[in-house]
Image (cartoon, coloured by chain):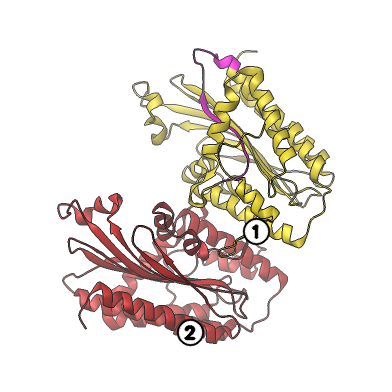
Chain colours: A yellow, B red
Amino acid sequence: MEITKENITEWLKGLQESICSALETADGKSKFLVENWKREEGGGGCSRVIKDGNVLEKGGVMFSAVHGTTPEFLLKEKEHSGNVDSNSTFYAAGVSIVLHPQNPMVPIIHMNVRYFEMSNGVKWLGGGIDLTPHYVNDEDAKYFHTEIKKVCDKHNANYYSKFKRWADDYFFITHRNETRGIGGIFFDKLNSDSEMSFEKNLAFWKDVGSAFAPIYVELIKRNKSRSFTGANKQWQLLRRGRYVEFNLIYDKGTKFGLESNGRIESILVSLPLNASWEYNFKPASGSEEERTLSLLKKGINWV
Amino acid sequence: MEITKENITEWLKGLQESICSALETADGKSKFLVENWKREEGGGGCSRVIKDGNVLEKGGVMFSAVHGTTPEFLLKEKEHSGNVDSNSTFYAAGVSIVLHPQNPMVPIIHMNVRYFEMSNGVKWLGGGIDLTPHYVNDEDAKYFHTEIKKVCDKHNANYYSKFKRWADDYFFITHRNETRGIGGIFFDKLNSDSEMSFEKNLAFWKDVGSAFAPIYVELIKRNKSRSFTGANKQWQLLRRGRYVEFNLIYDKGTKFGLESNGRIESILVSLPLNASWEYNFKPASGSEEERTLSLLKKGINWV
C-alpha cells in the first residue's frame, strides 16, 4: 500500500477501534463513550473514554488528526533549518492512551503513536509505551519488557536498548529523582537513515501500536483478581499523585496540547479519577512500597 | 528600626509563629508539625504543616531564608541590566501559606510575602493573597476583598485596584479559561518610586502579612459548621484538581522551587490531600456549582 497520510490516518483509526474493543472485552463491564470533535484551526479527533469498569476506573484511547499552519516553535527546530517555506503547513495524527485501573495490583499503562509531516516533505514517526506499576512485580516487569523487546528486535537489533534508554530519560520525574514507573520504550523523529527506510520504520511503528492490546490484556488477566488492602489503595493514590506531577510538569504531549489550544478534556483525560498527596510520606522500612520506590530508577535491565 | 535583611527575616519568623498559633486555635484539634531544614547551597527554612484538623484537612505555613550565588535567570532580568557584578549573591526570605479545609463551604486560601536582595544593593518586596472558594459566597467574597482593600488603602490609594488586577491576571488557569478563585491581590518587585519609599512599601507589605490570620479565622468561623452533601464534597475534589493544575503548571514559586533544587516536600505541601478529575464534567444547569464557575473570571468588582 502506498504511504500517504490518509493511509496512516486510516490505520490509526482502526488501531483505536481494535484497542477499545479488546479493552471492553477485558473489562467485562464498561463500554467506551465515543465523542467526535473538531478543531477550529483544522482537523479534529475521536475521544473514547471509559470509566467505572470492573478493571478500568478511568481511561482514554484518543485519536486525533489535526492540520494547519506550522507553529513557530516547530519551524525553529534544527531539523528544519534551511528547509522551510514561510507558508509551511503541517499534518499530525496519532493515538494516545492512558489507563488507570481500579485494582492497585494492576499497573497504569500509557501508549502513544504519532505521525507528523510538513508541506516541505519533512515527516517523521514517534511513539512510546511505558508501564507504571503501583507495586513493581518482577515477573510482570520482565514480561512487559520482553514483549516490547520482541517487537523492537523484529525490526532492528539496536532499537530496544536505544529506545529503552530514551524512555528511562523521558519518563523521569526530575524533582522527585524517580522514574515514573518501570519505563518501556520512547522514540521520536524516526524517518530513514543508513539502516532503516521510512517504510521499515513505519512497519516497526505499527507493530508497537498493535502490541499494546495483547500486552495490557495479559497484565490485566494476571492481576485483576488479586486481593488488596486499604493501605494498598492509599499507596495507589499517592503513586497517581506522581503521575499527575509528571503529566502536568514534564509530558511534552500535554504541554503541546495546552499551549496549542488543544481540546483540554481530551488532553487531561490522562489524569486519574482520584489522586493524593501526603506531606513527607515515607514508606515503612522493608515494605513493598519501599521496594517499589527503590526500583524507580534508570538503567535497570528488566529482561 | 533599621531596615536590614536580618530584621525583615526576624519579622517573617514571628509572622509564621503568630499565624500558626491563630490557626491552631481556630482549628481546635490539630497542631502544626514543625521541621527545620537546611539548604545545601546556603540558608534553610522552617516548615510547619497541619493535617487531620477539625477545620484544616491539610496545610502548610512555610518560612524560608536562602542565599547563595545569584541564579543566571535573575541576572538576566531587565531590572538589573548594567548593574550586576559577576560575583553577585542573593538573599531571599519569605512566608508562604496554602490551606485546604475539610468542609467544602470553607474556602482554600493562599498567602505569600517575600523579600529579595542582591549584593549590588538591588532589593524588592513581593507578595499576594488570594481566596479559592469551592462555592462562591457573595458575602464572604465582599468581606475578603473589603478587608484586603482596607490594608491597601491605608498605604496607597492606587494599590488595591492595581494589585487586584495583577491577581486576576496571575491566578489564572489559561487552559481552562478560569481564574483560580475570586482573586485578591498580587504584587512583585516593590521598592521605591515617586510616591512610595521602600520604608512605606515595607509597612504595607507587613500589613498584608498581618492581615492574613484575622481574615481567614473569620472565614473559618462563618463557614466551618455549615452542612454539606456528598455531592458538595465531590465538587470540592474537582476544584482541588484545578488547584493542582494551577500550582504545577503556572505557579512561579513552585516552578522556581522545582528548578532551583528547593525542598520538594515544602514546595508541594500546597497540593491537597485528595483531588479528583472527571472527564468532561459539566455542572447541572442552574446549580450552585454552575454559578461558582460563572464567577471564576477576571474583572469582577467584589467590593
Answer whether labels 2 and 1 touch (C-beta < 8 Å).
no
Indicate the position of residue A6 as horizontal and vertical percent values: 61, 22
Q: Nearer the viewer, residue A29 or A87?
A: A29
Which element type, helix, strand or loop, lies under badge 2?
helix
Q: Does any portion of residue B119 appear in the rendered image?
A: yes
The disc placed on residue A89 is none
Indicate the position of residue B159 as horizontal and vertical percent values: 30, 74
Residue of label 1: A285
Dot 2 alpha-carbon crowd within 10 angstroms: few under 14, some 14 to 19, many 20 or more: some
The answer to whether residue B49 is magenta is no
Q: CA distance from mark 2 to mark 1?
A: 34 Å
Which quadrant of the figure has residue A83? top left
Q: Which residues are magenta?
A: A179-200
Dot 1 alpha-carbon crowd within 10 angstroms: few under 14, some 14 to 19, many 20 or more: few
Label 1 marks a residue whose chain is A
Which quadrant of the figure has residue A217? top right
Q: Is residue A254 left or right of residue B111?
A: right
Which element type, helix, strand or loop, lies under badge 1?
loop
Mark 1: which amino acid? Ser
Q: Nearer the viewer, residue B4 or A8?
A: B4
Indicate the position of residue A98 as horizontal and vertical percent values: 65, 43
Mark 2: which amino acid? Ser
Up/down of A116 relative to B203, above or below: above
The verdict on a common chain for dots 2 and 1 is no
Residue of label 2: B21
The answer to whether residue A182 is magenta is yes
